[in-house]
Image (cartoon, rainbow, N blue to C red):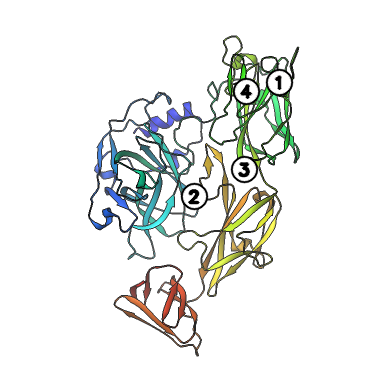
Amino acid sequence: MNLKKYICMVGIIFPMTIAAQQDKTLCDFENADSYASVGVYDTWEQSPFRTGKLTGNCQVVSNFLNQEDEQLGFAPNESSKILGVQRSRYGSNTFGALVELKEPFALTKKTQYVHVMMYSPKDGNVMLIGLGNRDDRPWQSKKTEQFWSTPSSKVQAGKWVDIVFPVSGANGITIHNLLVVVDRNSPHNLTEDYAVYVDNIVLSSQRDPFFSTKVYPINYEDNTKHTRGTDRYLSTIGLTSSHGAQTVDVNQSSVGTLYVNKMDNCLLAKPGDEITPSFTWKGSWMCGYVYLDKGNDGAFNVSYDDSGITDMGDLMAYSYFKNYNSAGNYVSGEPQVTPPAFDIPADLNPGFYRMRYKVDWDCVDPGGNTSSSNMITNNGGAIVDVRINVHADNVNLFRATEANGGGLNGDILLANGNAVTGQTTPFNKAFTIKASPAPGFEFDYVKIRHGYNLEGPATVCENLQWEEVTVKASQFTNGEYTVPAKLVDGDIRFVPYFKSTTAVTTAKADEALTLETVKGKLLAKAAAPQELSVVDAAGQTVFHGKVDGSRIIPLHKGVYVANGKKVMVP
């Protein structure tokens, strides 16, 4: 694939910020020097592809899928080689193509994005699993699972798509292998195998796809000029809800385009709210339309024919269409731009949604009037997209764990000492949390993820669903931190991180503790139940758990070090 040529095409067809200088191609399969090895892999230990009963089919082949995509208007993948993998019905839902990287990359606490081009004969959900080892554990297998990432989009049958996987982790982890899971659904309904193709794996700072079928399209290029900036233009849009009056500056006369993206602005409302929309418009003989993508499916759906609207769908209000407004009232003479009030559906789930405000003439098409006698590009209209946060009175709180120790060795509590999981707190109001490290540990930092669908993708149809901030121990005062109101914009997920302060076991003199390794296993005896920490020569904690009699209760299973030897904790 000619990435430079492709980026230029994206800049013309799909305007977006592309930080090409920060991108790193991990593998393009153009020649054997771009990867160390390829094959199939399954994280299920009893998989026939792990036991040796099956070998699987995975190899680099000539690209026979280099045709132009009619919807995109260009060929998304013109490279000469691609990776083909047979999705076996005998593999688990984590079976896929394993790519051993020629140049491994480091995980960081800051989220990076791995772009993978994929082509499948069927729609499906995919996943990326990063395999590698900790830098301070050179004996650790380079196929140790370090992250599992699910994307914000699905593979679409019969076309190349750029799937974006957000990846992050603790510092000091190197990813040597990428497992591209080509179908993460359970295989029990599969009746036959099929082939999926992979290409151009790129590590990037960009969270949006390099290319995609457009969501929320307009009927013109996004950068189409506004042709009547002196006598007709839109200055602001907004609404009045239970939060009162809210406005967003549009300034179409100075922006100079038909379409104005204001997705960085977020209006507020609650399910069941009566909404009074507002337009500040200069001009005459035009109509106003308001849409809300209630399904978060990337489109403003409305059905109509020559006789009128057959299904309002996502069209919430309009001031004029075929002589009537959305309240059902007949409109005679010049219509006003501001449409009647409407209600947010009472059963709409809390979340971030996209709204569209449109000024046009007698047209409910959310993409703008294309009639040769009254195109929106000629009548001086406007199209503006904005976010809205439809929220409940209270947001949900919970703590979670992540790989590499996230959420272990301590807790995050409310100021009153209660666990956060299962608790709620008022929307848009600050509240206080505190760190509670386990014995032998101290608080390091906490990740606070806020928004909606917090275990899902960060964006849905290019709409931001959640954001994450890291709060360091230095930002806590006397062990407490006040979560600011601006972060309480939806549900909140906490993942605390703690670091060891104990260099030896914490056994008391009268609570004898003995350790030994027998046939590669760690054995211990304690006179009374107590905690146990084992560290290596560099001071890194390699084991933490409890000893009860002769039983070792680890925080999690794995390989550790004791008395200078690697041992398995069963």
Q: Is residue 51 above or below residue 465?
A: below
- Please identify the residue farthest to the top as the structure is shown: 373
SS at badge 4: loop
Secondary element type, mark 1: loop
- Circles 4 and 3: CB distance less than 8 Å? no
Q: Please tell me whether mark 3 or mark 2 is closer to you in this view.
A: 3
Are discs 2 and 1 less than 8 Å apart at CB? no
Q: Earlier in the sequence, mark 3 or mark 2?
A: 2
The quarter of the image holding the N terminus is top left
Circles 3 and 2: CB atoms closer than 8 Å: no
Return the residue at label 1: 325
> Circle 4 is placed at which residue position?
256
**SS type, badge 3:** loop
The amino acid type of the residue labelled 4 equals Gly
Amino acid of disc 1: Asn
Q: In 3D space, how far apart are the residues under numbered discs 4 and 3 (Cα atoms)?
A: 36 Å
Q: Residue at x 51, y 36 (%)?
A: 17
Q: State which mark lies toward you, 4 or 3.
A: 3
Q: Nearer the viewer, mark 4 or mark 1?
A: 1
Q: Quadrant of residue 197?
A: top left
Task: Determine whether the residue tagged by mark 2 lies in a helix, strand or loop.
Answer: loop
Q: Position of residue 170 (x, y in %)?
A: 47, 58
Mark 3 — residue? 349
